[in-house]
Amino acid sequence: MEQEELLTTANLTLAPNIKQSDTKDDILILKNESTQSYLSIARAQHKTLHYFKSGSNVAEVLPKLISSSSCPPLRNFYELILQAVEANILQKENDDSKLTPALNWPISINEKVILILSIISFIIGILGLIKSGITLPQNTLDVVLSYAITCGCLSLGYLIAASVLKGYQCEVYKPHFHWLSFFPHFQVDLSDSIMSNRMCQLNLSLSRIAPLLFAIGICGMKYPQFNYVILLGLFYSTWPLGNSAAINLISVYFKKFRISTSHDFLFVQNKLLTTILSKKIIHTDIKYLLIYALYFIIWLGLLLLVQVYIFQINAEELVPFFDKSKEQIGLNKFIIFSVIISVIALSVSTGIWLLAKNIAAYFRSKNTNKIKKNLPDNISDVNPTAIEKALSKTLLFKDSSDDVRKKITKVIKASEYKPKSFVFKEGETGEELYIIYSGRVEILRELNNGRYVKITELTEGDAFGEIALLQNIPRTRSIRAIKPTILLTLSRTDFDNLVVTILGENKIKEIIQIRAFLMSLPMCKNWHPQAIQRFAELSNLIEINENQEVLKQDKENLFFYMVYEGTFEVRKDGKKVATIKKGDFFGEISLLKNSASNADVTAKQVGKCLILNRKDFLKFISHDFFVGLQFEKISSKRLKQPIFQAPPKD
């Protein structure tokens, strides 16, 4: 589903099976229990989502938020909607999200028990290392056994962590064996700990480390030759990359919790580099970065110290590798040396692999988050029911009765166009009205040298070709298909008998006149043709007399005004502050803030204005996020402060 549709007409409903939890930073965590998906939001954002409790679309909710003076900045609002849909907190109609069943985990461990066991394991581990130090495996069997013990301890750590998570009334998901690891081991998804408190996350980290510490202590007392490999397993479990136990522990206590809408953007307007950089600067957690950097240095230093310690203790055994053959040293010692070198090489290569994996995941998520266009329908699937449904979504026929649409459906024809094929060319005789059923076309202007320049694009629901029919002139522009496109074609005769008769020739001509005026304005040059058509249909052209007072400061305003002809003077507290001319607009601030007018506006000569009442203006800016963002930016600049208040900082 396209972002444009998600942020306008798509019907969204707050999922029924939502679980809620708080964090220490006064941020709410919402979880869809059916799909095991999470969303962290501010409390104000939670109130916004409740507008969708009974099902609604963004174009209906946004005017309500503005009218109640609780509308957040539009970028934040649109980001929230997309993040909520991504997390299945808001669900689309006929949602086919994959369900993620929780595991019926049979064991539950109390937090006090795991704290005591962790302390005991830590003491035993330290005592074992003090007693025996660190010793290399003596033979191949020692390597195999110590490796198996390490994998077993890592698996046991996850088993204990899952039991601890269950003790906090959280769910355990996705049990699996993690083969793609230096130490293959059993794993479960512990991410549901986000629904609990920090003590839960602390105990989960301790649970994963405790078996390794206990094994180091026991082996140090009886089998010291196992300690080196198990110690490498401990370094693996605590390394400063990925989802290690140590990183989770540091994050719990030092990383500030962030709301989902402040990072990993989905809204296309928030993916601009300037937005990303500004958010990174605002939300950079210096304290966490310093703690993380310090831990990285300590972890790396300890790893190097262990290697130096091992090499020094066993120097007599390692030196012969440089001047004796493999047979003289013995196969077992050759294997031991190979393991040591492999550990160092694999640590570096794994780090590089993780970095590459994260980069790939980033670009993969970007591609996933891109709006997926629906493939064009096959022309054989275009039936009367589908045509009638398509007509009901077009601006030209959406307000027509069912009977009228049925009549048009009977005479309208479907035709298919391949990419780069012309529908018609500039200068040709116009005998048909076209409506895009599926696909996309481009409007082209032909230059004197025969080359074509693209003016804009049209997509599903857009209509074109009516100017030549109404004014009885040749085609003014060329139209070419961009992708496989199906067009619905209405002949001149049927257009006159059905469309003109229903809407009236004057009304259609007025809409065309207003549309041409809007297309000539710099402000509207990037508007989608549907937005221009919608404004033309919603607005009324009124005449204003000379010296007529249009707006009165501190008095209620009910309209948005765009100057079609004439000049208007703006006064604030009796002082002239601006002159408004053709193409300028006013009145939007009081409508967006749901407040009285903040200035007097008077006509200096006879003029004309395109006006929209409050309801239609809010409806208009809610149906196109680009237009909404544009009015928000201009109004905030005029007001010299954000017109919509930002939610609390996370």
Image (cartoon, grey):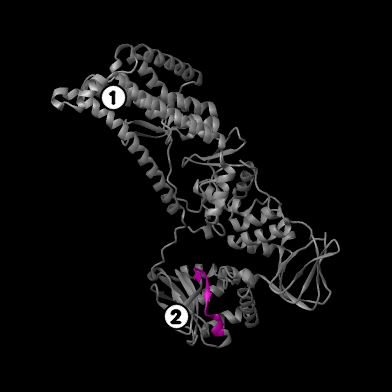
Q: Secondary structure at mark 2?
A: loop
Residue 463 lies within the magenta run: yes
The answer to whether residue 178 of the structure is visible from this angle is no
- Callout 1 amino acid: Ala
Instruction: Locate residue 295 relative to residue 506 in the image: left or right.
Output: left
Residue 553: percent from the left, percent from the top? 82, 61
Q: Which residue sits at x=40%, y=32%?
A: 188
- Callout 2 amino acid: Arg
Residue 10: percent from the left, percent from the top? 54, 57
Instruction: Locate residue 281 relative to residue 554 in the image: left or right.
Output: left
> Who is closer to the viewer here, 415 or 23?
23
Instruction: Locate residue 562 relative to residue 109 in the image: left or right.
Output: right
Q: Earlier in the sequence, mark 1 or mark 2?
A: 1
Magenta segment boundaries in residue numbering: 457-469
Q: Which residue is mark 2?
A: 451
Report the mark closest to the observer, 1 or 2: 2
The residues tagged by marks 1 and 2 sit, at their Cα atoms, a distance apart of 71 Å
Q: Secondary structure at mark 1?
A: helix
Hey, which quadrant is residue 63 in on the image?
bottom right
Hey, which quadrant is residue 61 in on the image?
bottom right
Outermost residue to the left = 327
Outermost residue to the right = 574
Q: Which residue is mark 1?
A: 148
Residue 379: percent from the left, percent from the top? 39, 71
Residue 131 lies within the magenta run: no
Location of residue 537 with respect to 237 vertically, above or below:
below
